[in-house]
Image: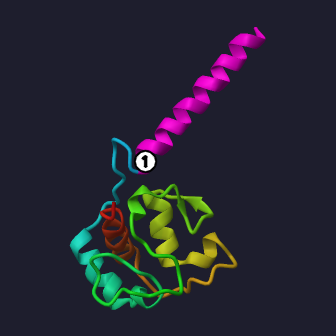
């Protein structure tokens, strides 16, 4: 019986690892419901590029915060929480509510705008 439990645990862990790989740039791409082209414009207007390097966004050449290149392939947001569309939208709206000591500020982004911004970030492979 102990061997069966061990096998179940191993298969469960392998399945979870496979899901993580798929979600982070494997066979299945993650996407957020929203307008990615509008999201790129919103990211530029919110001046996210003052802190971040963001491919495809004008003047987004910041070096204060991590670059957002290959964002769709990342398993974690800010190295702290799983990279899911729901969490990313909440992160964009209110980062300290997810990671209290983050340096990323609350910018007053609406949920609809955050969805569009997230949709753009998930185009970055």
Q: Secondary structure at mark 1?
A: helix
| Residue drawn at the location 53% of the way across and 87% of the way down | 64
Q: Is residue 15 left or right of residue 56?
A: right
Q: Residues within 10 Å of mark 1 (few under 14, many from 20)?
A: many
Residue 99 sits in quarter:
bottom right
Kindly give the residue lying farthest to the left in the view shown.
Answer: 37
Q: Main secondary structure of the magenta part?
A: helix
| Residue drawn at the location 40% of the way across and 74% of the way down | 111
Please say whether residue 14 is one of the residues in the magenta stretch.
yes
Kindly give the residue lying farthest to the right in the view shown.
Answer: 2
| Residue drawn at the location 31% of the way across and 83% of the way down | 42
**Quadrant (top left/top right/bottom left/bottom right) for the N terminus:** top right
Which residue matches tag 1? 23
Q: Is residue 2 left or right of residue 4?
A: right
Residue 85 sits in quarter:
bottom left
| Residue drawn at the location 31% of the way across and 69% of the way down | 120
* Rendered location of residue 97, percent (x, y): 62, 74
- Counting the numbered discs, the total is 1
**Which of 21 and 35 lies nearest the eye of the viewer?**
21
Above or below residue 99? Residue 5 is above
**Which of 45 and 54 lies nearest the eye of the viewer?**
54
Please say whether residue 45 is one of the residues in the magenta stretch.
no
Kindly give the residue lying farthest to the top in the view shown.
Answer: 1
Residue 103 sits in quarter:
bottom right
* Rendered location of residue 29, percent (x, y): 33, 50
- In magenta, the rendered stretch is 1-24
Q: Is residue 76 left or right of residue 116?
A: right
Above or below residue 35? Residue 27 is above
**Quadrant (top left/top right/bottom left/bottom right) for the C terminus:** bottom left
* Rendered location of residue 105, percent (x, y): 56, 86
* Rendered location of residue 53, percent (x, y): 41, 81
């Amino acid at each position: 019986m102990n061997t069966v439990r061990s096998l179940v645990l191993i298969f469960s862990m392998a399945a979870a690892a496979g899901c993580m790989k798929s979600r982070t740039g494997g066979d299945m791409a993650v996407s957020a419901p929203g307008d990615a082209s509008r999201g790129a414009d919103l990211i530029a207007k919110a001046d996210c590029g003052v802190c971040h390097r963001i491919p495809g966004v004008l003047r987004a050449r910041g070096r204060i915060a991590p670059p957002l290149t290959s964002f769709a392939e990342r398993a974690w947001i800010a190295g702290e929480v799983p990279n899911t569309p729901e969490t990313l939208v909440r992160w964009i709206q209110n980062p300290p509510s997810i990671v209290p000591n983050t340096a990323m500020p609350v910018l007053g982004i609406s949920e609809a705008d955050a969805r569009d911004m997230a949709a753009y970030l998930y185009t970055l492979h």
